[in-house]
Image (cartoon, rainbow, N blue to C red):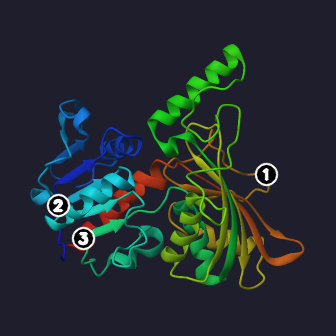
Amino acid sequence: MKWNLRRNPTVAIVGCTGAVGRELIRLIEERAPAFGDVHLLASESSAGTTITIRGKATAVQSLHGYDFSSTDIAFFAVGAETSDGHVPRAAEQGCLVIDKSSAFRMKPEVPLVVPQVNAHAIAERPDSGIIASPNCSTIPLVRALAPVHATVGVRGAVVSTYQAASGVGLACIDDLLDDSRACLDAGPGERPSRFPRPLAFNVVPQIDVFCDDGFTVEEQKMVLESRKILGDPGLAVTATTVRVPVVNVHSEAVYVQCARPTTREEIIKLLRAEVGLIVEERIDGYATPRFNPDPDAVTVGRIRTNPDNPAGVWMWIVADNLRPGAALNALDIAALAMKLSR
């Protein structure tokens, strides 16, 4: 199907009670995009509850049986299994679907989009009616790599992530906070955890399940998604993804192997030209999850070249995984789709 959006499209938020869905509602309140009616969808257990959006108490509807034919844009902020079961139905009913899950990201007919990097991917209006939004750790990585990739060239990158509990949802935030209190009150001990290992006062070098090659699914996502978004199937990306005891905001230490020698000054100049990137130019300048200068930006600091390899560049990337890493990227995709429909 070839989608074409109305001037004030009707919108549905699927997964409105989850961490990303709630952040999307906040962004709609803050930014007041030119949407018409906004429908809130979730599981049967949440149906009938009310959420205030744009000053109006709105009843949450059940996703099961919802008719998408009267909806122009559907944001899916749910897990891959739920998306896999309902996204095709929404698209077949004529709705443009912006899906945050991993269900459709690597399908050739579905564009995987970060608007600041590869807006051209949806310019032809994909026949599938589905646009995928990348993983919350991939988005800040490609936003920092893209200007370097386009000008200097990038042969590969080694990435170590420091990912917050909110990346797994609201229940995992509660798990971290509850276990932290328990550790302070009773000391560390074996307690049930939603993480592979207890996260409080700990770091866990496993996000998602392991693949046969020893990497995790999360690490595999970063590799494959970066290649697709940057249009570089030979890009040598490798990653170790680590969950850390932080409530929200992801961080990444990235070593970039450029195609030619470069300088710190050149990299800073390239990054500064990008909309939505904050560059900490001071040698001792860097953002942290607790002190993040702009929750809607990707901040890059600790930029330095390798003295033994002038084509090697280190950088430290910080981004709110619920906003630019998820909900804001989806909203930016919608804004781009609306612009293309004019």
- Residue at 31 percent of width and 63 percent of height: 335
At horizontal 44% and vertical 75% (from top left) the residue drawn is: 118
C-alpha gap between disc 3 and disc 1: 46 Å
Q: Measured from the top left, where is residue 195 in percent x and y? A: 58, 39
Asked if marks 3 and 1 touch (Cβ < 8 Å), the reply is: no
Foreground: disc 2 or disc 3: 3
Q: Is residue 153 above or below residue 102?
A: below
The residue labelled by disc 1 is 284
* Image side of residue 256 versus residue 150, left or right: right
Query: Could you tell me the amino acid type at mark 1?
Result: Asp
State the CA–CA distance, disc 1 to disc 2.
47 Å
Residue at image mark 2: 72
Q: Which mark is first along the chain, 1 or 3? A: 3
Residue 76 is situated, as x and y percent measured from the top left of the image, at: 31, 54
Q: Which residue is mark 3?
A: 129
Point out residue 246 in the picture as x, y percentages from the top left corner: 61, 38
Query: SS at mark 1?
Result: loop
Q: Residue furthest front?
A: 212
Q: Give the mark nearest the N terminus, 2 or 3.
A: 2
Q: Residue at x 62, y 43 (%)?
A: 289
Q: Amino acid at mark 2?
A: Asp
Q: CA distance from mark 2 to mark 3?
A: 11 Å
- The residue nearer to you, when weighing 161 against 89, is 89
Residue 163: percent from the left, percent from the top? 60, 48
* Residue 51 higher or lower than 28, as above or below: above
Q: Quadrant of residue 50?
A: top left
